[in-house]
Protein backbone atom coordinates (compact mmCIF):
# COMPACT_ATOMS: atom_id res chain seq x y z
CA UNK A 1 0.00 0.00 0.00
CA UNK A 2 2.92 2.37 0.48
CA UNK A 3 3.94 2.18 -3.19
CA UNK A 4 1.25 4.41 -4.69
CA UNK A 5 1.47 6.90 -1.83
CA UNK A 6 5.25 7.22 -2.29
CA UNK A 7 5.00 7.65 -6.04
CA UNK A 8 2.22 10.22 -5.59
CA UNK A 9 4.44 12.15 -3.15
CA UNK A 10 7.38 12.07 -5.58
CA UNK A 11 5.10 13.44 -8.30
CA UNK A 12 3.91 16.25 -6.03
CA UNK A 13 7.45 17.20 -5.04
CA UNK A 14 8.61 17.09 -8.66
CA UNK A 15 5.83 19.43 -9.82
CA UNK A 16 6.46 21.80 -6.92
CA UNK A 17 10.21 21.89 -7.56
CA UNK A 18 9.71 22.49 -11.29
CA UNK A 19 7.33 25.36 -10.58
CA UNK A 20 9.62 26.97 -8.00
CA UNK A 21 12.80 26.70 -10.07
CA UNK A 22 10.93 27.80 -13.18
CA UNK A 23 9.88 30.99 -11.42
CA UNK A 24 13.39 31.43 -10.06
CA UNK A 25 15.15 31.10 -13.41
CA UNK A 26 12.66 33.38 -15.13
CA UNK A 27 13.15 36.26 -12.70
CA UNK A 28 16.72 35.82 -11.49
CA UNK A 29 18.86 36.49 -14.61
CA UNK A 30 17.34 39.95 -15.26
CA UNK A 31 17.59 40.73 -11.54
CA UNK A 32 21.24 39.70 -11.50
CA UNK A 33 22.17 41.59 -14.65
CA UNK A 34 20.37 44.79 -13.70
CA UNK A 35 20.79 44.74 -9.95
CA UNK A 36 24.15 43.33 -9.02
CA UNK A 37 26.25 45.54 -11.25
CA UNK A 38 24.35 48.78 -10.67
CA UNK A 39 23.22 48.55 -7.02
CA UNK A 40 25.99 46.55 -5.40
CA UNK A 41 26.15 43.43 -3.30
CA UNK A 42 23.79 44.01 -0.35
CA UNK A 43 20.82 45.56 -2.18
CA UNK A 44 21.05 42.73 -4.71
CA UNK A 45 21.07 40.08 -1.96
CA UNK A 46 18.12 41.68 -0.16
CA UNK A 47 16.10 41.95 -3.36
CA UNK A 48 17.01 38.37 -4.29
CA UNK A 49 15.77 37.19 -0.89
CA UNK A 50 12.49 39.04 -1.38
CA UNK A 51 12.01 37.41 -4.78
CA UNK A 52 12.83 33.96 -3.39
CA UNK A 53 10.24 34.44 -0.62
CA UNK A 54 7.73 35.64 -3.22
CA UNK A 55 8.47 32.60 -5.39
CA UNK A 56 7.97 30.27 -2.42
CA UNK A 57 4.63 31.89 -1.66
CA UNK A 58 3.50 31.72 -5.29
CA UNK A 59 4.56 28.09 -5.56
CA UNK A 60 2.75 27.13 -2.35
CA UNK A 61 -0.37 29.00 -3.41
CA UNK A 62 -0.31 27.47 -6.90
CA UNK A 63 0.08 23.84 -5.85
CA UNK A 64 -2.68 24.19 -3.28
CA UNK A 65 -4.95 26.01 -5.73
CA UNK A 66 -4.37 23.43 -8.45
CA UNK A 67 -4.94 20.58 -5.99
CA UNK A 68 -1.56 18.84 -6.13
CA UNK A 69 -1.55 18.22 -2.39
CA UNK A 70 -4.60 16.66 -0.81
CA UNK A 71 -5.23 16.52 2.88
CA UNK A 72 -5.57 13.02 4.25
CA UNK A 73 -8.82 12.30 6.06
CA UNK A 74 -8.49 12.55 9.80
CA UNK A 75 -8.29 9.26 11.64
CA UNK A 76 -11.06 8.45 14.08
CA UNK A 77 -9.54 7.48 17.44
CA UNK A 78 -12.23 4.86 18.05
CA UNK A 79 -11.53 3.07 14.77
CA UNK A 80 -7.74 3.01 15.08
CA UNK A 81 -6.36 -0.22 16.46
CA UNK A 82 -3.67 0.02 19.09
CA UNK A 83 -0.45 -1.82 18.24
CA UNK A 84 0.09 -5.03 20.13
CA UNK A 85 3.34 -5.47 22.01
Image (cartoon, helix red, strand yellow):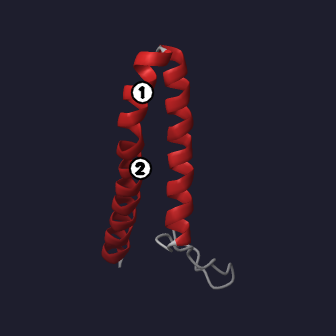
The spot of residue 36 in percent (x, y) is: 42, 20
The spot of residue 72 in percent (x, y) is: 55, 75
| Residue 36 as seen in the image, left or right of residue 60 | left
Observer-side mark, 1 or 2, equals 1
State which quadrant residue 10 falls in.
Answer: bottom left
Q: Nearer the viewer, residue 4 or 47?
A: 47
Q: Nearer the viewer, residue 30 or 54?
A: 30
Please say if 45 is above or below 80. above
Q: Which residue is mark 1?
A: 34
State which quadrant residue 17 falls in.
Answer: bottom left
Could you tell me which residue is drawn at 52 percent across and 64 percent down? 62
Bin the neighbour count of mark 2 within 10 Å (Cα to Cα): few under 14, some 14-19, many 20 and up: some
| Residue 22 as seen in the image, left or right of residue 48 | left
| Residue 61 as seen in the image, left or right of residue 5 | right
The spot of residue 47 in percent (x, y) is: 54, 29
Q: Secondary structure at mark 2?
A: helix
Could you tell me which residue is drawn at 35 percent across and 35 percent down? 29
Q: How many marks?
A: 2
Q: Which quadrant: the N terminus? A: bottom left
Q: Residue furthest bottom?
A: 79
Indicate which disc residue 62 carries: none
Q: Mark 1 or mark 2: which comes first in sequence?
A: 2
Please say if 69 is above or below 50. below
Q: For the residues labelled 1 and 2, say whether their Cβ atoms are less than 8 Å apart.
A: no
Q: Which residue is mark 2?
A: 23
Could you tell me which residue is drawn at 57 percent across and 61 percent down? 61
The spot of residue 81 in percent (x, y) is: 58, 80
Query: Spatial distance from mark 1 to mark 2, Cα to Cα?
Result: 17 Å
Please say if 85 is above or below 26. below
Amino acid sequence: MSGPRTSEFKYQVLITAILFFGLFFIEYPPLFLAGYWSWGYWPHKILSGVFIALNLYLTQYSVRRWGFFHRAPEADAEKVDEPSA
